[in-house]
Image (tube, rainbow, N blue to C red):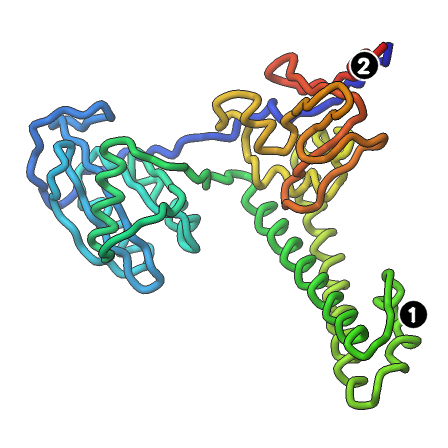
């Protein structure tokens, strides 16, 4: 019998979902009242207004639909905080807003969430036929009215906001550094120079390769090596700052104790997950984190996407930990506050 492996994971111990609510006065304009009731929260007049916004860099189109699918109003608003908040507050309560995922989605969520009763960010669906900003805005409002939400995008980061930006900066610097490394090797191989390993990236080991290049290509190689050196320093600095911010959160220290999760993976995990309680059940949470177990047969044992192995391993294909493998291991949650990973007994 294999001994049980207990991990001190705190992935299910913290609830960060705090709703933003603000008692605001009714808007300055009055919209026609609808006669059909709605299942959503209603105001004193029994009205619910569904708002769709098609956001762009210079302007946003805001459209309002009533509970009976009647198109009430639409307007084009400049993309700035004051104009958008004024346009939303001019609509009587209760306001339910839907936006599409994009570059402005996070900023719009933080800015408009205190001024509406409900705000939903959804993935951009595939659409065909004629398109316009007004048509798209009314389509978003109508889909919100009937509850046809294809996939929601979670935007509330709470106290992990700074960690999320530091993690994003670290990932971008890692991507840029790897891109420069590939360019250095590509330049050497284009001149018939066989290169392998990481010695070519060090200051002492690169001279043996650069000296074999023709004079015309030497300057290019030197510039790429200098770029790699600067990116490497920035990458280390971003990693230090990310770790310093992550250590401020108690969840980071608990998650880091899980087998297969190191400092980098634990720091990248929380800005993506935020809170486990936004998932319907524990298995959806495991699958989102890459911890969902899958058993193919007696001889083929998998955890996530990695095949069976004798050591713990983490795939590096995703920003969050995509797979963690334990030999002959079953993953289960014994309670809401912990995840226990126990070895199965094989005779």
10 Å neighbourhood of mark 1: few (<14), some, or many (≥20)? few
Residue matched to label 1: 205
Quick one: label 1 or label 2, which is nearer the N terminus? Answer: 2
Q: Residue at x 74, y 51 (%)?
A: 240
Residue matched to label 2: 4
Comparing 275 with 146, the one in front is 146
Comparing 308 with 166, the one in front is 308
Q: Residue at x 86, y 75 (%)?
A: 193
Comparing 211 with 23, the one in front is 211
Looking at the rendered image, the quarter that the N terminus falls into is: top right
119 on left or right of 41: right
Is any part of residue 257 visible from this angle?
no
Tell me the distance, in whole angstroms, between the alpha carbons under discs 1 and 2.
Answer: 46 Å
10 Å neighbourhood of mark 2: few (<14), some, or many (≥20)? few
16 on left or right of 108: right
Q: Residue at x 52, y 21 (%)?
A: 281
Residue 44 point in image, percent of width and height:
15, 26
* Labels 1 & 2 near each other (Cβ < 8 A): no
Residue 153 point in image, percent of width and height:
44, 40
Q: Quadrant of residue 103?
A: bottom left
Comparing 253 with 12, the one in front is 12
311 on left or right of 82: right
| Residue 115 drawn above or below residue 346 | below
Where disc 1 sits, the SS reads loop
Q: Quadrant of residue 310?
A: top right
Residue 96 point in image, percent of width and height:
26, 36
Where disc 2 sits, the SS reads loop
Q: Residue at x 20, y 54 (%)?
A: 134
């Amino acid at each position: 019998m294999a001994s049980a492996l207990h991990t001190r994971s705190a992935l299910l111990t913290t609830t960060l979902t705090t709703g933003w609510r603000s008692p605001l006065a009714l808007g300055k304009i009055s919209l026609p009242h609808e006669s059909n009731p709605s299942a959503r929260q209603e105001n004193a007049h029994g009205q619910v207004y569904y708002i769709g916004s098609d956001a762009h860099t210079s302007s946003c189109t805001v459209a309002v639909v009533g509970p009976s699918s009647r198109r009430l109003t639409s307007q084009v608003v400049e993309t700035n905080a004051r104009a958008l908040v004024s346009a939303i507050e001019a609509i009587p309560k209760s306001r339910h807003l839907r936006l599409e995922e994009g570059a402005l989605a996070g900023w719009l969520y933080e800015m408009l969430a205190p001024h509406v009763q409900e705000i939903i960010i959804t993935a951009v669906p595939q659409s065909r036929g004629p398109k316009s900003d007004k048509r798209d805005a009314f389509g978003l409002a109508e889909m919100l009215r009937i509850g046809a939400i294809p996939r929601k995008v979670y935007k509330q980061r709470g106290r992990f906001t700074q960690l999320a930006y530091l993690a994003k900066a670290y990932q971008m610097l890692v991507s840029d550094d790897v891109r420069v490394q590939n360019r250095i090797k590509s330049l050497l191989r284009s001149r018939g120079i066989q290169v392998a390993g990481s010695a070519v990236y060090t200051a002492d080991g690169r001279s043996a390769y650069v000296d074999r290049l023709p004079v015309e290509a030497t300057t290019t190689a030197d510039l790429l090596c200098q770029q790699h050196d600067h990116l490497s320093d920035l990458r280390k600095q971003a990693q230090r700052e990310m770790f310093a911010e992550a250590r401020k959160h108690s969840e980071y220290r608990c998650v880091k104790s899980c087998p297969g999760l190191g400092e980098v993976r634990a720091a990248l995990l929380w800005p993506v997950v935020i809170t486990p309680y936004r998932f319907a059940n524990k298995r959806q949470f495991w699958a989102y984190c890459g911890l969902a177990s899958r058993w193919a047969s007696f001889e083929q044992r998998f955890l996530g996407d990695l095949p069976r192995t004798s050591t713990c391993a983490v795939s590096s294909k995703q920003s969050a930990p995509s797979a963690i493998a334990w030999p002959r291991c079953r993953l289960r949650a014994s309670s809401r506050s912990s995840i226990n990973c126990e070895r199965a007994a094989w005779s």
